[in-house]
Amino acid sequence: MSEKLKIKLSIGNRIYPLTIDPSQEEGLRKAAKNIDVMIKQFEQSYSVRDKQDVLAMCALQFASQVEQKTIDKAYVSEHVEEKLNALNDLLHAHLIS
């Protein structure tokens, strides 16, 4: 069983203490940094008074990116499957003749 690691992440000028697996540290630190960058972008681009609104927009942005990647992956998989089926049909036709 691996040893847990205690870290503190700063997101939106607040500190969040976490106990994590060491393998999660890099991803969590990068995610926190990306959130802070996005918070600054939203605050500079829009006149937002409430930090919760900015955080909600960040959550929506990240969630939509995940959903879009899922949609794109499904499309690519479907396209690859169609190409493989066409190739299989071509090979089958060639072997029969």
Image: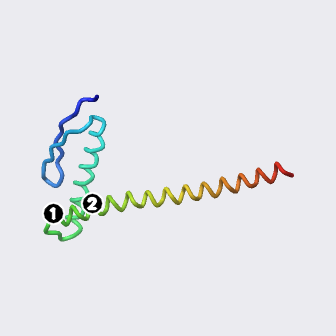
Disc 1 marks a residue whose amino acid type is: Lys
SS class, disc 2: helix
Picture quadrant of residue 24? top left
Residue 67 image offset from top left, x and y in percent: 40, 60
Q: Is residue 35 above or below residue 43?
A: above
- In the image, farthest residue toward the right: 97
Q: Is residue 17 above or below residue 70?
A: above
Neighbour class for label 1 at 10 Å: few (<14), some, many (≥20)?
few
Residue at 21 percent across and 59 percent down: it is 40
Which residue is at the front of the view, 5 or 96? 96
Residue at 31 percent across and 62 percent down: it is 61
Residue 23 image offset from top left, x and y in percent: 31, 36
User: How many numbered tags mark residues here?
Assistant: 2
Q: Which residue is mark 2?
A: 59
Residue 90 image offset from top left, x and y in percent: 76, 54
Q: Which residue is mark 1?
A: 51
Neighbour class for label 2 at 10 Å: few (<14), some, many (≥20)?
some
Q: Is residue 76 left or right of residue 8?
A: right
- In the image, farthest residue toward the bottom: 47
Disc 2 marks a residue whose amino acid type is: Ala
Q: Nearer the viewer, mark 2 or mark 1?
A: 2
Residue 26 image offset from top left, x and y in percent: 29, 40
Colour option used: rainbow
Residue at 27 percent across and 60 percent down: it is 59
SS class, disc 1: helix
Label 2, label 1: how many angstroms apart (C-alpha)? Answer: 12 Å
Which residue is at the front of the view, 55 or 74? 74
